Structure formats: C-alpha cells, structure tokens
Image (tube, rainbow, N blue to C red):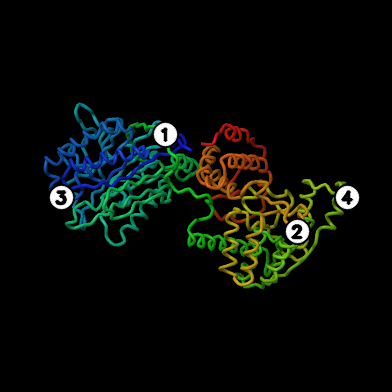
C-alpha cells in the first residue's frame, strides 16, 4: 500500500536540528546537505532548519565579521543545486546584509534557485538576548529585493509562498521571537491565506520554557486554523551563557502532531505530514475566520513540490477518533461528557416542573444502560430520590434472558422504580389487526415492536407526569438504525450526541468510577453482550440471533467514517485511505470499502429521521441536530459519493 501524499492533500515536512560548530560555516553546510539528502530519502517535500543555522545563533560580535557573512552567503549558493537534484524545498537561516543593515533571515531554496529571503521582525533584547546589537528588524528594511549573481530575489517579511500543485498550501515564515510577540506576523499571514506557518528558531532552555513553547505553538496553530512548524537550534550552540535543546514541534489547528526529543546529541530529523485539505475545509466552515482579513499587502512567490509516495503517514491516526487512547484522557473526557449529559437533563427537569420524574426504556444494552445511569446520577445531582426514575423493561419475542436479567438487576441495584411490561401479547394483537401473516419476521414485524415500546413509554410518562428519556445514540442516527416513530422519538434524547464507541467507554467509566459495587459488575456484563436490537426470536440456547455489527459492520468503522466525514468533510476516497491505514491490522481493504459504502448509502437514505429529531445535548464537535450542526435535504442524492467509492481500488 503506497500513498501518493500530495494527491490526498498531505504536505510532508522535515524539521532538522543539525549538528553544528559555531562560526564553522563549511562544517555546518555539510551537515545541512546531509540532512537534506536524508529528508529526501524519507519523502519530505519541504525541510525546515533552525534560525541562523549556517553560522550558529551564538556567534555574537562575530556577526560583524565580513568573512563570516560572506562564507554563509557562498554556502547558501552551494546548497541551491541540491534542492533541484533532490526535488525539495529547503528553508534555512543566515545573516544577510542589505541596505547598510544586517538582518537575521530565513532563505527559501527551491528548484535550484533562491526564491525569497524573509527577515525577522521582532528582535529580543532583554535578559540573555542582545539581537538588536547586531540585527535590524524587517520594519527597518529599505529595499524589497536582493541582487545575487545576476538574480533578483524578493526580500521582506511580506512574502508568502503558495504551492501551485497542492491546493490550499501557502507557506508563511516567521523567526523565533516573532511567535512570542503580542501580535505574531503569522496571524496576518494566515488571514492572507497562509496555511503552513514555519518558524526558524534558536530558543534556549530555562525551567518551564518547553511547556510554554509547546502551548504557544499549539495555540497559534489553532488561532490561525493552520499548521505551525517550529524548528529550534540544538545543543551544539555555544554554552557560554545558555543551553539550547533542539526542541522542534508541529501542531495543526491546535493539535500537537509531533515533537522532537530535547537535548539530543545527534542530528534530529522530525517528519510530519500536514493535512492541508483538512485546514482548507476548517477555514471554509469557520465564519469568524472568513471575515478576518489581513490589512497587510503580501507578495506571493509560487513554488512546486515533487510527487512523493509512502506506505505510512507521519501524523496521529486513531481508529477510534471519538475515544482517546490515553487512559487518563479517556477518563477525563468521560467525566466531562457525563457532566454535560446530567446537567442537560437536570436543566430540562427543572424547567418541566419540581420533582418531575423520568421514564427510561431499558433493554440490557449499552444505550439504555447509559440513559439509565445518566438519569440516576441526575437525580443525585438535583437531590431528588432515585425512585423518580422509572425504568421500564419491555420483554418481547426477541428478548434473551441475559439482557432482561441485566436490565432488571441494574434497575434494582440503582434503587430506581422498576416496571416490567411484556409486549408480546400486544404485539401479536397489533400484527393481527393490520393483517401481518403469522411467522413473517420482516421489517413490519421488527418496527412494530419498537413502536409498541415507544407507545408504552410515552403513555406511561403521561400517566406519571414524567419525561420520556430517549436512549438512541449518534451512530444509530447517522446510520438510520432506528425506527421512525419508534425509538427515534422521545421527550429528551440524552444520548443523541454520543457515538456508539464512546457509549461503551462512558458506561464502563460510570460503572467503575461513579457507582461501583454490584452496578459495576452488571455493567461489565452488559459491555460484553453483543450489540443487538433483539427484534427476532433468539437462536437455540437463548442466543442473540440479530447481531447488529454482523448486519451493518463494526461500529468502530462507522464511527471512524462519521468523524472524518462530518468533522473534516473529507471525500470518500480519503476516508477510505485513512480507514485502510487505521484498520489494516484488523480488516481487509475489501471489507472496509463495503462498510464505507454502506455508511454513505444509509446516511443519505435516512436523513428524514434526523430532520425531526427531539431535543438532545451536543457533547462533541460532531453532532446531527437539524437545529444545530447538520442541515441536509432529506431527498439529497448519494450518487456522487457512491460513484467515487465504486472507482476506488485498495492502495
């Protein structure tokens, strides 16, 4: 499986903190050349180096020496052919003399040419820093071009570099202190279209600075809806008064993609794949960003990148994007979501009336278990008695002893009011009334059970003056795996914002952390029970006959598609690619393609159910409420999406 990176919207960058010797330009240039070759072998489109890497940042008054400056400029010229040979873009730092002033600059090398030189804007001159002693700011620049070997080169901090053959990729460059300023130049660059912000840095280390640096990079990438790559000088800089660590980081819209180890005693190369398509889509749907217009005029210098193929992506890719891999983060997220659910239900109950109860249909499955746990915890939150929670078990023709036993035991262990109302007789009468043939277990047979249960819940809620709480989750809404006018309805849909993969996490966390004891043991068995609507008679041995994931495919795959479709608006071909990478150890490409196609077919076909959803709390960035996050015509055609999938072949 080999991926054509740029055709899927990825820009691979390498951040290199090379070994150097202070003021030994030829040595430094050789190490930079070696790093360029290594980066090219790793499939990088672009290589970023630290601030003043050709000379060393800590040269001090040696910057006044013409021999040092001349050597750096000549070394820069010597490196140009390598960018043509290796077909990559290199951005590195050196001192540049222009208009009678000296500037701390970033040089952009591509296609065997010097494409632009960007001077630093903000010069630190406090504490251990004395940059104004040697350098001038871009604001003191008196010329827009440099002349070198008969070539005219654009010069200034007003340069942006669009990549012509990667739509949406526009490079903006700033240098070290620029990021630490109250209004970083990169903010205006982003407003002018830059999606890939690069920082050449020589940031020394003091206690606590690494965490603050990380926070700056992440927050700036999020504020700018951009990728932000920060490449810093390593331990080879002079230690006369400072220590440097080579701390390089890359963040994308607030998410830290990668960072290098600090204090390494060898050249470090950090590879990262930036998803430019994701950034483009983020900006298109962000109305605040759309009205943020740069007041500065920029000059645009086009670049091109070479085709790169690889078998992997250098960026985080979780098969469960709704569920964190880290145990502590998983628990923190579960706690926050449960707080959102209980506060939402509490607010609705306080609005409806004092001491209003709730009615919850319980099946012994994950969704109804979560709804029941939320309801019980909400009563605790309000200081009301748990008996105001009416848990209704409604065994039918497809119910198994295991699920019914778990549902009823859980209600008893929680101390809520339990109602057991079998539906078999009522279902039989209803099917007889509408002329349904005996023994025909079709969609009518299945949906009649869901609607019979919903009728009981609504009518019981009316009799008790209570609120009927829905149990359906976000994944079922996306797939239309709910009966219109049945479990699709409720007075309040408490799980509507929670995808199936996250429901299991929440249920486990509640059982173990909030309730414990017998509740935790029951919940453990519920989590181990196959997911099923239990609408068909059990198999011999009281085994569940209707396993949902055997019919639809794994919910973890559907949640993966749901996340990348609604959160990032990726095309089917890209989602299929990412799914192959995320699940290649578990499912074949053919299986994944079948399930992705099924998701799109069902998502479009069942929009009418989502167009009239009951109220329910949004808990994450992906939601399907027609009043909030998702507006789509119920008769939209799925043809374009399925045609793209039909044309795909596993990579």
Q: Which residue in the protein does label 3 denote?
A: 60
Pick the residue in front: 449 or 21.
21
Q: Residue at x 78, y 58 (%)?
A: 396
Q: Which of labels 2 and 1 is toward the front?
A: 2
Q: Which residue in the protein does label 2 denote?
A: 542
Q: Residue at x 62, y 62 (%)?
A: 345
Residue 166: mark in rendering: 1
Real-space Cα separation, disc 1 to disc 3, in angstroms: 40 Å
Q: Secondary structure at mark 1?
A: loop
Q: Residue at x 53, y 47 (%)?
A: 585
Real-space Cα separation, disc 2 to disc 3, in angstroms: 81 Å
Question: 10 Å neighbourhood of mark 3: few (<14), some, or many (≥20)?
Answer: some
Residue at the extreme top: 150
Real-space Cα separation, disc 4 to disc 2, in angstroms: 29 Å
Q: Secondary structure at mark 2?
A: loop
Real-space Cα separation, disc 3 to disc 4, in angstroms: 94 Å
Residue 433: mark in rendering: 4
Tell me which label, 3 or 4, sits earlier in the chain: 3
């Amino acid at each position: 499986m080999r991926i054509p990176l740029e055709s899927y919207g990825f820009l691979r960058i390498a951040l290199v903190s090379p070994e150097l010797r202070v003021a030994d330009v030829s040595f430094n240039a050789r190490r930079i050349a070696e790093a360029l070759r290594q980066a090219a072998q790793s499939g990088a489109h672009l290589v970023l180096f630290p601030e003043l890497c050709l000379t060393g940042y800590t040269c001090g008054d040696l910057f006044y020496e013409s021999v040092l400056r001349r050597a750096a400029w000549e070394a820069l010229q010597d490196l140009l052919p390598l960018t043509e040979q290796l077909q990559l873009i290199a951005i590195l730092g050196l001192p540049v003399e222009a208009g009678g002033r000296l500037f701390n600059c970033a040089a952009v090398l591509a296609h065997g040419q010097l494409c632009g030189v960007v001077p630093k804007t903000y010069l630190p001159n406090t504490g251990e820093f004395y940059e104004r002693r040697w350098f001038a700011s871009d604001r003191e620049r008196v010329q827009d071009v440099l002349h070198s070997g008969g070539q005219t080169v654009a010069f200034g901090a007003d340069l942006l570099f669009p990549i012509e053959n990667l739509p949406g990729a526009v490079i903006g460059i700033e240098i070290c202190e620029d990021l630490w300023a109250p209004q970083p130049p990169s903010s205006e660059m982003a407003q002018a279209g830059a999606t890939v912000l690069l920082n050449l840095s020589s940031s020394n280390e003091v206690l606590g600075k690494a965490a603050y640096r990380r926070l700056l990079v992440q927050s700036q990438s999020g504020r700018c809806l951009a990728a932000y790559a920060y490449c810093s000088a390593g331990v080879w800089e002079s230690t006369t008064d400072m220590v440097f660590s080579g701390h390089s980081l890359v963040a994308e819209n607030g998410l830290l993609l990668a960072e290098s180890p600090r204090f390494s005693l060898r050249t470090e190369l950090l590879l990262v794949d930036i998803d430019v398509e994701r950034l483009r889509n983020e900006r298109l749907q962000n109305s605040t960003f759309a009205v943020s217009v740069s007041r500065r005029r920029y000059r645009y210098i086009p670049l091109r990148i070479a085709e790169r193929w690889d078998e992997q992506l250098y960026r985080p890719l979780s098969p469960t994007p709704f569920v964190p891999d880290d145990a502590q983060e998983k628990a923190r997220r579960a706690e926050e979501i449960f707080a959102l659910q209980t506060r939402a239900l509490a607010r609705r109950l306080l609005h409806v009336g004092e001491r209003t109860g709730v009615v919850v249909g319980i099946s012994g499955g994950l969704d109804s278990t979560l709804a029941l746990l939320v309801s019980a915890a909400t009563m605790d939150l309000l200081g009301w008695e748990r008996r105001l929670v009416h848990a209704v078990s409604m065994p039918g023709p497809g119910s198994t002893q295991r699920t019914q036993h778990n549902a009823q035991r859980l209600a008893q262990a929680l101390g809520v009011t339990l109602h057991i109302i079998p539906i078999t007789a009522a279902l039989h009468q209803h099917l007889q009334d509408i002329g349904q043939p005996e023994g025909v277990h079709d969609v009518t047979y299945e949906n009649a059970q869901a609607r019979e249960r919903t009728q009981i819940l609504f009518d019981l809620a009316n009799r008790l003056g209570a609120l009927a709480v829905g149990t359906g989750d976000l994944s079922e809404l996306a797939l239309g795996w709910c009966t219109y006018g049945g479990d699709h309805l409720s007075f309040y849909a408490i799980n509507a914002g929670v995808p199936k993969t996250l429901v299991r996490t929440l249920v486990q966390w509640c059982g173990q952390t909030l309730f414990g004891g017998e509740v935790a043991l029951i919940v453990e068995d519920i989590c181990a029970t196959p997911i099923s609507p239990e609408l068909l008679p059990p198999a011999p041995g009281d085994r569940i006959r209707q396993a949902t994931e055997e019919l639809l495919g794994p919910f973890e795959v559907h949640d993966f598609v749901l996340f990348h479709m609604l959160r990032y608006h990726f095309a089917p071909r890209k989602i299929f690619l990412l799914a192959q990478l995320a699940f290649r150890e578990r499912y074949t490409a053919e299986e994944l393609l079948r399930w992705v196609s099924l998701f799109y077919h069902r998502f479009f076909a069942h929009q009418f159910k989502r167009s009239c959803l009951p109220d329910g709390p949004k808990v994450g960035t992906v939601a399907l409420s027609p009043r909030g996050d998702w507006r789509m015509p119920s008769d939209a055609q799925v043809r374009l999406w399925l045609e793209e999938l039909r044309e795909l072949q596993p990579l």
